[in-house]
Amino acid sequence: MPEGPHEAPPPQLLRTEEAWSDAELKATLEAYKRLLNGERLSKAGLYRELSQRFSRAPGAYERRMQNISAVLSERGQPWVPGLKPQKNVGANVRPRLERLMQEILVGDSDTGTAYEPEVLALLNQPHLPVPSGQQRPATSTKLVTDHARDAAVKAWVLKNAQGMCECCGKSAPFRTVNDLPYLEVHHVRTLASGGADTVDNTVAICPNCHRELHHGTGALELRARLYARVDRLRVEPSDRLKTS
Protein backbone atom coordinates (compact mmCIF):
# COMPACT_ATOMS: atom_id res chain seq x y z
CA MET A 1 0.00 0.00 0.00
CA PRO A 2 1.42 3.54 -0.79
CA GLU A 3 2.68 5.53 2.16
CA GLY A 4 0.57 8.38 3.52
CA PRO A 5 1.86 11.92 2.97
CA HIS A 6 3.30 12.22 6.47
CA GLU A 7 4.50 8.69 7.11
CA ALA A 8 8.20 8.14 7.74
CA PRO A 9 10.12 6.04 5.21
CA PRO A 10 10.93 2.43 6.12
CA PRO A 11 13.83 2.16 8.63
CA GLN A 12 16.18 0.71 6.00
CA LEU A 13 15.88 3.94 3.97
CA LEU A 14 16.60 6.28 6.84
CA ARG A 15 19.96 8.05 6.97
CA THR A 16 21.51 9.21 10.22
CA GLU A 17 25.14 10.21 9.88
CA GLU A 18 25.28 10.99 6.16
CA ALA A 19 26.27 14.50 5.09
CA TRP A 20 23.55 17.13 5.08
CA SER A 21 23.03 18.84 1.72
CA ASP A 22 22.37 22.57 1.46
CA ALA A 23 18.84 21.74 0.27
CA GLU A 24 18.19 19.70 3.42
CA LEU A 25 19.63 22.39 5.71
CA LYS A 26 17.59 25.04 3.94
CA ALA A 27 14.36 23.05 4.28
CA THR A 28 15.07 22.57 8.01
CA LEU A 29 15.71 26.30 8.44
CA GLU A 30 12.52 27.18 6.59
CA ALA A 31 10.55 24.87 8.89
CA TYR A 32 12.28 26.42 11.91
CA LYS A 33 11.40 29.91 10.67
CA ARG A 34 7.72 28.98 10.57
CA LEU A 35 7.92 28.03 14.25
CA LEU A 36 9.91 31.17 15.06
CA ASN A 37 7.25 33.30 13.38
CA GLY A 38 4.63 31.84 15.71
CA GLU A 39 2.81 29.46 13.36
CA ARG A 40 0.87 26.88 15.36
CA LEU A 41 2.46 23.74 13.99
CA SER A 42 3.28 20.33 15.36
CA LYS A 43 7.05 20.00 15.69
CA ALA A 44 6.73 16.23 15.34
CA GLY A 45 4.71 16.75 12.19
CA LEU A 46 7.44 18.95 10.72
CA TYR A 47 10.07 16.34 11.55
CA ARG A 48 8.00 13.67 9.80
CA GLU A 49 7.53 15.85 6.72
CA LEU A 50 11.27 16.47 6.49
CA SER A 51 11.97 12.78 7.08
CA GLN A 52 9.61 11.82 4.26
CA ARG A 53 11.28 14.34 1.97
CA PHE A 54 14.94 13.55 2.69
CA SER A 55 14.89 9.98 4.08
CA ARG A 56 16.55 10.81 7.39
CA ALA A 57 15.30 9.82 10.84
CA PRO A 58 12.78 12.39 12.22
CA GLY A 59 14.81 12.85 15.41
CA ALA A 60 17.73 14.19 13.36
CA TYR A 61 15.66 17.24 12.42
CA GLU A 62 14.82 17.99 16.04
CA ARG A 63 18.55 17.89 16.88
CA ARG A 64 19.39 20.09 13.90
CA MET A 65 16.77 22.62 14.95
CA GLN A 66 18.29 22.62 18.42
CA ASN A 67 21.61 23.44 16.72
CA ILE A 68 19.87 26.40 15.05
CA SER A 69 18.61 27.52 18.48
CA ALA A 70 22.19 27.33 19.77
CA VAL A 71 23.53 29.62 17.05
CA LEU A 72 20.68 32.10 17.56
CA SER A 73 21.26 32.03 21.32
CA GLU A 74 24.97 32.77 20.82
CA ARG A 75 23.99 35.83 18.78
CA GLY A 76 21.55 37.05 21.43
CA GLN A 77 18.58 36.46 19.13
CA PRO A 78 15.26 34.79 19.95
CA TRP A 79 14.94 31.04 19.43
CA VAL A 80 11.98 28.67 19.38
CA PRO A 81 10.76 27.64 22.85
CA GLY A 82 10.90 23.88 23.25
CA LEU A 83 13.95 23.58 21.01
CA LYS A 84 16.61 23.95 23.68
CA PRO A 85 20.01 25.01 22.24
CA GLN A 86 22.32 22.10 21.50
CA LYS A 87 25.82 23.22 20.55
CA ASN A 88 27.27 20.14 18.83
CA VAL A 89 26.63 21.58 15.37
CA GLY A 90 29.57 19.93 13.61
CA ALA A 91 32.57 21.64 12.06
CA ASN A 92 31.60 20.64 8.52
CA VAL A 93 27.99 21.78 8.85
CA ARG A 94 28.27 25.01 10.85
CA PRO A 95 29.71 27.33 8.16
CA ARG A 96 27.01 26.30 5.69
CA LEU A 97 24.31 26.45 8.34
CA GLU A 98 25.32 29.99 9.36
CA ARG A 99 25.42 31.13 5.73
CA LEU A 100 21.92 29.78 5.10
CA MET A 101 20.70 31.21 8.43
CA GLN A 102 21.85 34.65 7.30
CA GLU A 103 19.78 34.24 4.14
CA ILE A 104 16.66 32.70 5.65
CA LEU A 105 16.43 33.84 9.29
CA VAL A 106 18.47 37.05 9.38
CA GLY A 107 17.78 38.20 5.85
CA ASP A 108 15.98 41.31 7.05
CA SER A 109 18.86 42.58 9.21
CA ASP A 110 20.01 46.14 8.50
CA THR A 111 23.29 45.37 6.76
CA GLY A 112 23.40 48.10 4.14
CA THR A 113 23.89 51.83 4.04
CA ALA A 114 21.05 53.93 5.38
CA TYR A 115 21.43 56.78 2.92
CA GLU A 116 18.64 56.21 0.41
CA PRO A 117 17.45 59.37 -1.41
CA GLU A 118 14.47 59.82 0.94
CA VAL A 119 16.71 59.53 4.01
CA LEU A 120 19.21 62.00 2.52
CA ALA A 121 16.44 64.52 1.93
CA LEU A 122 15.28 64.21 5.54
CA LEU A 123 18.83 64.51 6.87
CA ASN A 124 19.21 67.82 5.06
CA GLN A 125 16.28 69.34 6.93
CA PRO A 126 17.42 71.75 9.68
CA HIS A 127 14.89 70.41 12.19
CA LEU A 128 13.75 66.79 12.23
CA PRO A 129 10.93 65.98 14.68
CA VAL A 130 10.82 62.62 16.41
CA PRO A 131 8.85 60.36 14.02
CA SER A 132 6.14 57.99 15.22
CA GLY A 133 7.47 55.16 13.06
CA GLN A 134 5.57 51.94 12.47
CA GLN A 135 4.56 49.51 15.18
CA ARG A 136 3.83 46.82 12.57
CA PRO A 137 5.96 47.41 9.46
CA ALA A 138 4.50 46.07 6.23
CA THR A 139 6.21 42.98 4.83
CA SER A 140 6.64 41.24 1.49
CA THR A 141 7.67 37.59 1.30
CA LYS A 142 10.45 36.50 -1.09
CA LEU A 143 13.27 34.06 -0.35
CA VAL A 144 13.55 36.10 2.84
CA THR A 145 11.16 38.54 4.47
CA ASP A 146 11.73 42.23 3.87
CA HIS A 147 10.23 44.70 6.30
CA ALA A 148 9.32 48.18 5.11
CA ARG A 149 11.39 50.69 7.07
CA ASP A 150 10.48 54.27 7.86
CA ALA A 151 13.03 56.61 6.28
CA ALA A 152 12.20 59.24 8.90
CA VAL A 153 13.19 56.85 11.71
CA LYS A 154 16.55 56.15 10.05
CA ALA A 155 17.20 59.81 9.36
CA TRP A 156 16.32 60.90 12.92
CA VAL A 157 18.51 58.23 14.52
CA LEU A 158 21.46 59.07 12.25
CA LYS A 159 21.08 62.80 12.85
CA ASN A 160 20.72 62.32 16.60
CA ALA A 161 23.94 60.25 16.75
CA GLN A 162 25.96 63.21 15.40
CA GLY A 163 28.52 60.95 13.76
CA MET A 164 29.25 58.89 16.89
CA CYS A 165 28.58 55.17 17.25
CA GLU A 166 25.89 54.72 19.91
CA CYS A 167 27.42 51.39 20.91
CA CYS A 168 31.17 51.96 21.33
CA GLY A 169 31.10 55.78 21.44
CA LYS A 170 33.73 56.18 18.70
CA SER A 171 33.51 58.44 15.66
CA ALA A 172 32.17 57.03 12.40
CA PRO A 173 35.04 55.26 10.60
CA PHE A 174 34.81 57.39 7.45
CA ARG A 175 32.70 59.91 5.55
CA THR A 176 30.53 58.91 2.61
CA VAL A 177 30.46 60.36 -0.90
CA ASN A 178 27.62 62.54 0.42
CA ASP A 179 30.10 63.91 3.02
CA LEU A 180 28.19 62.30 5.88
CA PRO A 181 29.64 60.21 8.71
CA TYR A 182 29.11 56.55 7.87
CA LEU A 183 27.00 54.75 10.48
CA GLU A 184 24.61 51.84 10.04
CA VAL A 185 21.11 51.63 11.46
CA HIS A 186 20.29 48.61 13.65
CA HIS A 187 17.07 47.43 15.30
CA VAL A 188 18.00 46.24 18.80
CA ARG A 189 15.11 43.81 18.80
CA THR A 190 15.04 42.58 15.21
CA LEU A 191 12.02 43.21 13.01
CA ALA A 192 11.93 39.45 12.31
CA SER A 193 11.33 38.77 16.02
CA GLY A 194 8.57 41.38 16.29
CA GLY A 195 10.63 44.49 17.05
CA ALA A 196 9.19 47.89 16.15
CA ASP A 197 10.60 50.23 13.51
CA THR A 198 10.71 53.15 15.95
CA VAL A 199 13.43 55.35 17.44
CA ASP A 200 13.13 53.59 20.82
CA ASN A 201 14.23 50.31 19.19
CA THR A 202 16.77 51.69 16.70
CA VAL A 203 20.38 52.86 17.00
CA ALA A 204 23.09 54.26 14.72
CA ILE A 205 26.29 52.25 15.07
CA CYS A 206 29.63 51.68 13.37
CA PRO A 207 30.06 48.68 11.04
CA ASN A 208 32.25 46.80 13.54
CA CYS A 209 29.66 46.99 16.31
CA HIS A 210 26.91 46.13 13.84
CA ARG A 211 28.63 42.97 12.64
CA GLU A 212 29.45 41.99 16.23
CA LEU A 213 25.81 42.40 17.24
CA HIS A 214 24.78 40.00 14.47
CA HIS A 215 27.68 37.56 14.52
CA GLY A 216 29.87 38.06 17.61
CA THR A 217 30.16 35.72 20.56
CA GLY A 218 29.65 38.75 22.82
CA ALA A 219 26.49 39.91 21.04
CA LEU A 220 24.27 39.44 24.09
CA GLU A 221 26.55 41.57 26.30
CA LEU A 222 26.80 44.21 23.58
CA ARG A 223 23.03 44.35 23.32
CA ALA A 224 22.73 44.84 27.08
CA ARG A 225 25.32 47.63 26.84
CA LEU A 226 23.17 49.41 24.25
CA TYR A 227 20.13 49.34 26.54
CA ALA A 228 22.23 50.77 29.37
CA ARG A 229 23.94 53.39 27.23
CA VAL A 230 21.11 54.77 25.07
CA ASP A 231 18.39 56.31 27.22
CA ARG A 232 15.67 56.37 24.57
CA LEU A 233 15.73 52.58 24.03
CA ARG A 234 12.75 50.74 25.43
CA VAL A 235 13.31 47.24 26.77
CA GLU A 236 10.38 45.05 25.81
CA PRO A 237 9.11 42.61 28.49
CA SER A 238 10.27 39.54 26.53
CA ASP A 239 13.81 40.98 26.44
CA ARG A 240 14.21 41.84 30.13
CA LEU A 241 15.75 38.54 31.21
CA LYS A 242 18.14 38.62 28.25
CA THR A 243 19.49 42.06 29.15
CA SER A 244 19.64 41.78 32.94
Image (tube, grey):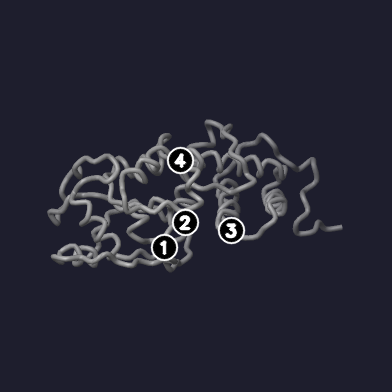
Residue underneath mark 4: 244
Query: Which one is nearer the viewer's eye here, 183 or 59?
Result: 183
At mark 1, the secondary structure is strand
Disc 2 designates what residue? 192
- State yes or no: discs 2 and 3 in contact (Cβ < 8 Å): no
Q: Nearer the viewer, mark 3 or mark 4?
A: 4
Image quarter of the N terminus: bottom right
Circle 2: element type:
helix
Which circle, 4 or 2, is nearer the viewer? 4
Q: Which quadrant holds the C terminus?
A: top left
Q: Residues within 10 Å of mark 4 (few under 14, many from 20)?
A: few
Of label 2 and label 3, which has the lower sequence position?
A: 3
Give the x, y percent position of residue 157. 26, 56
**Residue of label 1:** 147
206 left or right, relative to 178: right
The reply, left or right, for residue 91 in relation to residue 41 is left
| Residue occupying image coordinates x 33% and y 44% | 210
Q: Are marks 1 and 2 in contact (CB under 8 Å)?
A: yes
Mark 1 or mark 2: whose residue is earlier in sequence: 1
Residue 47 appears at what percent x and percent y? 69, 49
Residue topped by disc 3? 38
Query: Quick one: label 3 or label 4, which is nearer the N terminus?
Result: 3
Look at label 2 and name its amino acid: Ala
Q: Is residue 95 left or right of residue 63?
A: left
Q: CA distance from mark 2 to mark 3?
A: 11 Å
Choose top left, top right, bottom left or bottom right for residue 16. Answer: top right
Amino acid found under the numbered disc labelled 3: Gly
Q: Position of residue 104 (x, y in %)?
A: 49, 52
